[in-house]
Amino acid sequence: MKARYDDIDEYIRDLREEIKTNDKCANHYYNLGLAFLSKRDFVAAEDAFLKAVENSPRLAEAYVQLGGICQSRGDLDGCLRYNEEAANLRPKFAIPQSNIAYARLQKGEPDKAMEAIAKALQWNPNFTQAKNALGIAHYMKKEYGEAEKVFLDLLREQPEFAPAWHNLSLNMFDQGRFDEAVEASDRAANLGYEIPEGFLKELEPYRKRS
C-alpha cells in the first residue's frame, strides 16, 4: 500500500481514515507504526504497534518492532521481553533471536547470546547480523581464534560489511596484532563505519609506525 504514496503524511492520514472504519484491523495499526518509524516518531509508532498486538496478539512482527523501539531508548529488558514474545509465537523466526542475542551481548551475557544466535542461524544460516553477533560473543569470551574465524568467514561472504571489519580490528588489537588492527580499522572507516574515538586514540601510536 505504501508504495502508492509519495508523501508519508498522506499515507498516515489515509491509514487513520481506514482505521476509523475498521479499528480492529491489526495490519492497519502495524503499517501505521512502520510509517511513524520512518518519521522517527517512536512514541506514535509504539502506540500503533501496541494497538496492533492488542487486536492480533500473535502478530510476532509487531513485537519485534516494539523490541526495536525499546532498544533505541536503551531499554534492554524491554527489548528482550518483546523479542522473546515474538520468538515464542514464531519459533522459526530468526530476527527476534538475533535481537535477543544483541540485548544479551549488551548486558554482558555472551553465553546466553550464543544460545539465541544458534537458533537464529538454524533458521537463517546466512543471517549477517547473527554471524557478526557470534563473533562478538567469542570475542567477549576472549576466544580470539574462534572470533577471528567467524569475522573472516563473514567478510568473505560480505566484504563490505563494515561492522565486522571493526570487530576484527578489536579482536586483533587485544592480541597485540597492532598493524593488522590498524588495517582492519581503516577498512571499516573507509566503508563508512564510525570508529569510536577512544579506539582511534589507542590505534594512533601503531598507525604512525605502520
Image (spheres, rainbow, N blue to C red):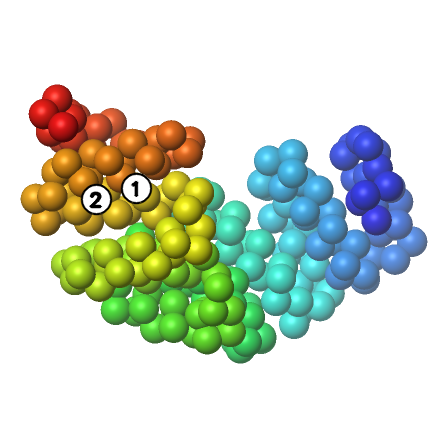
The C terminus sits in image quarter? top left
Residue 194 location in percent, x, y? 36, 31
Crowd rating for badge 1 (residues with CA inside 10 Å; few <14, some 14–19, many 20+)? many
Disc 1 element: helix
Task: Residue at the far right: name it.
Answer: 21
Q: Residue at x 17, y 58 (%)?
A: 144
Residue 195 location in percent, x, y? 30, 32
> Can residue 143 be seen in the rendering of this structure?
yes
Numbered tag placed on residue 170 in the rendering:
2
- Residue 178: image quadrant is top left
> Can residue 13 be seen in the rendering of this structure?
no
Residue type pointed to by label 1? His
Q: Residue at x 35, y 59 (%)?
A: 153
Q: Is residue 75 or residue 4 the one in the foreground?
A: 4
Residue contact at pointers 1 and 2, CB within 8 angstroms: yes
Disc 2 element: helix
Height in image: 4 above or below 48? above
Q: Which residue is mark 1?
A: 166
Q: How many marks?
A: 2
Marks 1/2: CA–CA distance: 6 Å
Residue type pointed to by label 2? Leu
Height in image: 63 above or below 199? below
Q: Residue at x 52, y 63 (%)?
A: 95
Height in image: 25 above or below 89? above
In this image, 209 relative to 93: left or right?
Answer: left
Q: Is residue 91 or residue 163 the one in the foreground?
A: 163
